[in-house]
Amino acid sequence: MEKIIQFQQVTWRRNSREILKDINWEVKEGEHWCILGLNGSGKTSLLNIVTGYNYPTSGKVSVLGNVFGKTNIPELRKRIGFVSSSLDQFSQNLHKEITENIVVSGKFASIGLYEEVSEEDWVQADQLLESLRLSHLKGKSYRSLSQGEQQKVLIARALMSKPEILILDEPCTGLDVLAREEVLQWINDVNERDCHLLYVTHHIEEIVDVISHVLLICDGEIVAGGPKKEVLTDERLSETYKIPVTVRWEDNRPWLTVPKAKVF
Ligand SMILES: Nc1ncnc2c1ncn2[C@@H]1O[C@H](COP(=O)(O)OP(=O)(O)OP(=O)(O)O)[C@@H](O)[C@H]1O
């Protein structure tokens, strides 16, 4: 089985502080991972190594068969889709655009359309919108969409370049309960493509069926990584979140209970 991501004894140091420590992690073909950890635990730093924005201080990294240090990172990045709230920095441009323009722009890693779009690209965007059940949003400006629809459009945009890895960094932040369930169900359904999800969240109940594996990080170190049912235990999550917690499963989805906390 091909390895999609492989970290071997990876550390990442900044200002003489070890932010990631001795990370050993493997994502294999067909696996979809969720990454959990407190604020500042190192999730973004880890993902920035996958996308080549951070370079490991020591250790070995390979992504999609490319060994870091011997590979063309910009070329590799074209094979990785990324949806994060940091896209907000483009929001002024984004809000004016209509759905299909935003989706097709995913081909060029831009927000506005500055390059010639071929007939083929429009057909692909059209097919994508249809297969993702988003055709009804065509012609509508981004600003007129609900937050849930906006998230779906950004994910569709990331899929336009047919990524082999899709990073979703807290895609449900800011959504109300109903919109969140809709987006989660949609992610669950649409992920029948040859694309490996890396899903970051602070809410374990967002670990829907499609996510097969979980990585727990605490203070830059891996607490556990593996099949979700093995990893999401009271003990390991309590260690990750530094507070006693209990997990219960409902319809194959985990939920967290936190005991009454002392508020200082
Ligand atoms: N470029 C950098 N230089 C110095 N320190 C950094 C850098 N990037 C991240 N850090 C520090 O590394 C630690 C881990 O940060 P990181 O953003 O990876 O955490 P995170 O788990 O993604 O947090 P959050 O859930 O809040 O997004 C933090 O203490 C952060 O301040």
Image: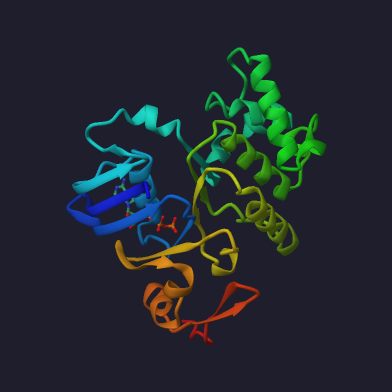
Q: Nearer the viewer, residue 57 or 123?
A: 123
Q: Give the x, y percent position of residue 201.
A: 52, 60
Q: How is the image coloured?
A: rainbow
| Image quadrant in which you'd find residue 104 | top right
Asked if 31 appears above or below 4 in the picture, the reply is below
The residue that appears at 58% across and 14% down in the rendered structure is: 115
Asked if 249 appears above or below 62 in the picture, the reply is below
Q: Which residue lies furthest to the top in this view?
A: 116
Relative side of 10 to 184, left or right: left
Q: Give the x, y percent position of residue 186.
A: 69, 52
Asked if 5 appears above or below 39 in the picture, the reply is above
| Image quadrant in which you'd find residue 158 | top right
The residue that appears at 50% across and 37% down in the rendered structure is: 163
Q: Can residue 97 be seen in this view?
A: no
Q: Give the x, y percent position of residue 70.
A: 23, 32
Q: How many numbered badges does the structure rendering display?
A: 0
Q: Can residue 226 be seen in this view?
A: yes
Q: Give the x, y percent position of residue 231.
A: 42, 72
Ligand 1, seen in the image, is in the quarter at bottom left
Asked if 251 appears above or below 171 in the picture, the reply is below
The residue that appears at 62% across and 55% down in the rendered structure is: 172
